[in-house]
Amino acid sequence: MVYRLGRWAGFGEGQGGSDSLDFAALFGRMLDAVLSFDFAYLLETAWPVWWPMMVGSVPTAIAAWFVFYYLIRAPVSAYQRRRVRFVRVAQAQGQRMTRHLRLGVNIDHVATIRNARGGRHPDPVRAARMAAAAGADGITAHLREDRRHISDDDITQLTRQIDLPLNLEMAATEEMLAIALRHRPHAACIVPERREERTTEGGLDAVGGGNHLAPFVRALGEAGIRVSLFIEPAKEQIDAARQLGAPVVELHTGAYCDADGQRRDAELARIVDAAAHAEAIGLECHAGHGLTFDTVGPVAAIPTIVELNIGHFLVGEAIFCGLEQSIRLMRDAMDAARGGGPAR
């Protein structure tokens, strides 16, 4: 076939070639000529056959390469992606870290318990002080539009009475922006919010909602408030956060915490990949939502995550062992996963 293709392309015409050759006999005579050093025969008789074969083999080889390439491209790419994810997970879980992993304690549900009956007890400010004593690096409070737990006065008292950095979780609304600008917390994490949800059910859509989010990110940043966006662990969301000018992203870990078995491994791999990408493009990476003693270890071991925000589980566990003890146990679990407890 390659010989005929070369002849069809115009190579070998007028050189004694034929479309119907006895190749077995020809190769036998060529071998005899090589062994007897009969180069005249090779030039006069064999070359008009070899030349169109060589030319015809080029498009044949190119066509075969394209067919083979497109047949194996998808499975090879899938294997490479899986391999990279699992290597990153293994490196993250086995790497000994010296960088301290910060713990932000969310005190929302201290206020939930208070509001269930009314009055002032239990006091979120007191809980914040206990968190500081137990090893927390910061306090997180979500002032929701419906004020179902944290109140405006809680934010006022927290900014006045605690020494730890305050991270205000807020929806992207004009009301919340005005409150943030009035109190000037250390950080503000913009989160999605729906009145009918029991808790934050997913991350912001920084890709589709960029035009809405941009003025909030800009206004908070200009006020000296460190802005983070609470997003899903997805590359396109992280890229969008960077384009918006947010210096920090917080990855939603809810899907990982809710999953089991191989699905949990896959969700963890998503978080590993997302955190690595965030660091690669210059963003600080935090994570949180649904973390417990059982699920915090693999996330804490990811070297590109620098802060975890945990709340509901700590307040729930406090019923059984006390708030300070629950925070200390979480702090110990984080440090163990990170490879020891570095000095803060």
Image: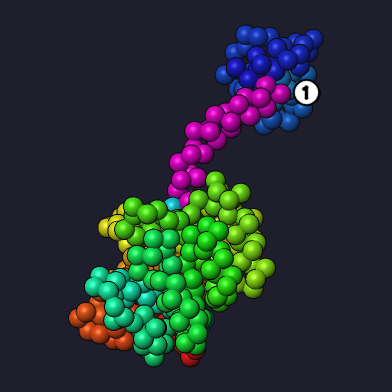
Q: In this picture, which residue range is highlighted in magenta?
A: 55-81
Residue 272 x %, y % = 46, 62
Residue 186, above or below 206: below
The quarter holding residue 127 reads bottom left
Q: Secondary structure at mark 1?
A: helix
Q: Residues within 10 Å of mark 1 (few under 14, many from 20)?
A: few
Q: Main secondary structure of the magenta part?
A: helix
Q: Amino acid at mark 1?
A: Leu
The residue shown at (58%, 32%) is 65
Residue 142 x %, y % = 43, 68
**Residue 230 shows in this picture:** no
In the foreground, 131 or 335: 131
**Residue 103 shows in this picture:** yes
What residue would you read off at disc 1? 43
Q: Residue furthest front?
A: 119
In the foreground, 226 or 157: 157
Q: Where, quadrant-wise, is the N terminus in this rendering?
A: top right
The residue shown at (65%, 71%) is 223
The quarter holding residue 147 reads bottom left
